[in-house]
Amino acid sequence: MSNSSSITEFLLLPFPGTQQLQLLHFCLFLATYLAALLGNSLIITTIAWYHHLHTPMYFFLLNLSILDLGAISTTVPKSIVYSLRHSSDISYTGCVLQLFFLVFLIPAEYFLLTIMAYDRYIAICRPLHYGTLLGSRACAHMAAAAWACGFLYGLLHTANTFSLPLCQGNAVHQFFCEIPQILKLSCSTAYLRELWLLVVSACLFFACFVFIVVSYVQIFRAVLRMPSQQGRHKAFATCLPHLAVVSLFVSTAIFAYLKPPSISSPSLDLVLAVLYSVVPPAMNPLIYSLRNQELKAALSKLLTGCFQKQ
């Protein structure tokens, strides 16, 4: 294909191996998606249903679950369908939309995780100012800012990526449309423009990560001064999983987008893509529900009520 105007579809990377391995891929992705769908849906329903959970922490968690559902639904269902019909073609428009929603929802989720770190910092280090700094209006504005920044980020990267002339074929070596793989199809030095934009984005993500780490350093210092062992345990149980999810996301996403071409391989790209786009949305419900006693109690009450009605 000579240029991007002649491309009507892209060919995504099929999962290699025998029919048994492809069946295993289907089962694993289906189980992961159903777990993410069920877990995030239960969190959204529980927080929306119980008034005592209408606090800043759970408001941000509800937004996180919505973003998780959107992010994992952008890539995994299509991959499941491809493994069934042994075809991995996606239309040009479908590829554009898939890349846009992925680059919109995942950064928005990361910005929201940054806000959640700030929420935990205020709650533990400055509890007397919590109601003032994190009122309902302030929380709504911060959540809206995360969504808006993610949307603008996705729009900018998508427009910039697909404005490049593509003349290296239409084979995308990934199970979804991803910016680094689209850039490999470009035949112009204009791809350096998007590459520099990715570098600037990585610096922004790293700055957010530094903010999160500094916030948690202050949190851990405050927690270690707590006289109550139960209070320390509760604070660590809330904060450590959050930090683990953020670290996994940042490390894998930055490496996936900025790694040198010399160490790139289909298997490595596949693992990194799964780690930053599939694992966090599936793991977040487990981390935030199983480690939170208040949410577990509300969820148990909701499920018990549903079963009793039946």
Image (cartoon, rainbow, N blue to C red):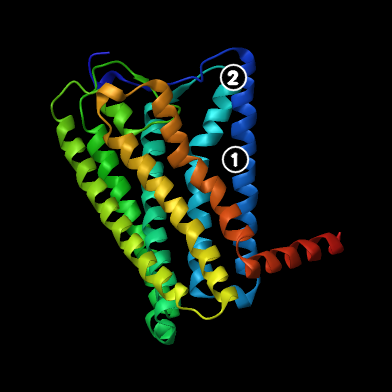
Q: Quadrant of the C terminus?
A: bottom right
Mark count: 2
Marks 2 and 1, Cα distance to the nearest angstrom?
18 Å
Position of residue 129 relative to residue 187, above or below, is: below
Q: Secondary structure at mark 1?
A: helix
Position of residue 127 relative to residue 236, above or below, is: below
User: Farthest residue toward the left?
Assistant: 189
Is residue 248 visible from the viewing direction of this image? yes
Q: Quadrant of the N terminus?
A: top left
Q: Give the mark, 2 or 1, whose residue is nearer the N terminus.
A: 1
The 10 Å Cα crowd at callout 1, few under 14, some 14 to 19, many 20 or more, is many
The 10 Å Cα crowd at callout 2, few under 14, some 14 to 19, many 20 or more, is few
The location of residue 179, given as percent across then percent down, is: 31, 34
Going by the numbered disc 2, the residue's amino acid type is: Arg
Residue under label 1, please give it: 33
Going by the numbered disc 1, the residue's amino acid type is: Tyr
Q: Is residue 307 left or right of residue 127?
A: right
Q: Are marks 2 and 1 in contact (CB under 8 Å)?
A: no
Instruction: State the residue at coordinates (52%, 47%).
Output: 281
The location of residue 57, given as percent across then percent down, is: 50, 70
For residue 149, which quarter of the picture? bottom left
Residue under label 2, please give it: 85
Q: Is residue 258 left or right of residue 193?
A: right
The location of residue 24, given as percent across then percent down, is: 63, 24
